[in-house]
Amino acid sequence: MQQSAVPELAHTHTRPIHWLATATAVAGVVALSSVLQPNSATAAQTAGPEAEKAHAATAPPDPSGVDFPLECGPVKAIVVKKATGDLDGDGTPETVAVVHCDSPMGTPPDGVYVLNRATETAAPRIVATLVNPKDGITVSDIAVRDGAVVADLLGYSTQDVPRCCPDVKKSAKWQWKNGAFVRSTPAGARSV
C-alpha cells in the first residue's frame, strides 16, 4: 500500500460538531424559505360582483326542482341523465333532461325535456318535449353538440317484445330552427 504524499487533513474527519453545524444551517435555510415564499399564483383575476352576476345568469337550469309532466302514481319522477348547452343561440345554456318514473321493476319509458330560464332568479321551465314517455322509448345516451341535442333511443319493434329488452336502436338529432326543435337522423346513424 502506498502512502499519500499529502498529509492528513484534520477537517476530513467528521466530528459531532460538524453534524450539528450542518443540521443548524439546513434548519435555518428551511425556516427562512418558508417565511420568504412568494404569494401563490392564480390563473385568473378575482371576480367582482358584476362577473359573479354574469356567471350566475349563464348557469344552466337545474332540473331537480322542475315538476315534469309524468304520471308516476305512488313513485316519483327522477332525472336520470342531463346535458347542457346553448341550443337556441341566445348565449345562455339550456338543460336537456331525461326523466322517468322511479319504477322498482321493468324499464320505465323516458321523457326528454328542454329546460330554459328567463332570468337568473326565475325557476327553470319546460320549453319543449323532445320525447314523450307515452312513446315507450328509453334513452341510452344524450349530449349537446354544436347547438344540437343528439341521443341514442331504444325502443321495441312490436308489442310482443318484453318491456325489459328493447330491440330497436335509433339515433336522433334535434336542432332549433325557426322557433321549434326539428328532429332528424344524424349522419352515419344506424338501426339495430
Image (cartoon, rainbow, N blue to C red):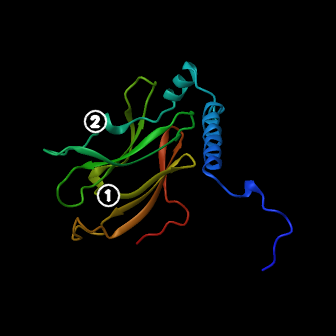
Mark number, residue 168: none
Which label is found at residue 137? 1
The disc labelled 1 sits on which kind of residue?
Answer: Ile
Q: Residue at x 30, y 52 (%)?
A: 110
Quarter placement of the C terminus: bottom left
User: In the current view of this chain or complex, which residue is farthest to the right?
Assistant: 5
Kindly indicate the quadrant of the structure image that contains residue 71: top left
Task: Residue at 47%, 69% (x, y): give it.
Answer: 190
Name the residue rendered at 38%, 31% in the picture.
Answer: 124
Q: Nearer the viewer, residue 56 or 35?
A: 35
> Is 31 or 145 nearer to us in this picture?
31
What type is the residue that disc 2 sits on?
Answer: Asp
Measured from the top left, where is residue 63 in percent x and y? 36, 38
The x and y percentages for residue 93 are: 50, 37
Q: Residue 57 at x, y = what percent?
A: 50, 27
- Circle 1: element type: loop
In the rendered image, which residue does mark 2 sit on? 67
Tell whether 130 sits left or right of 89.
left
On the image, the x and y values in percent for residue 129 come to: 37, 44
Q: Choose top left, top right, bottom left or bottom right for residue 24.
A: top right
Quadrant of the drawing holding the N terminus? bottom right
Front-most of residues 51 and 101: 51
* Sequence-earlier tag: 2 or 1: 2
Query: What residue appears at the point 56 percent right and 33 percent down from the top-left corner?
Result: 90
Taking 138 as reference, is 86 above or below it? above
* SS at badge 2: loop
Residue extending farthest left: 74
Cα–Cα span, label 2 and label 1: 20 Å
Circle 2 crowding by C-alpha within 10 Å: few under 14, some 14–19, many from 20: few
Q: Which residue ends up furthest to the bottom in the rendered image?
A: 1
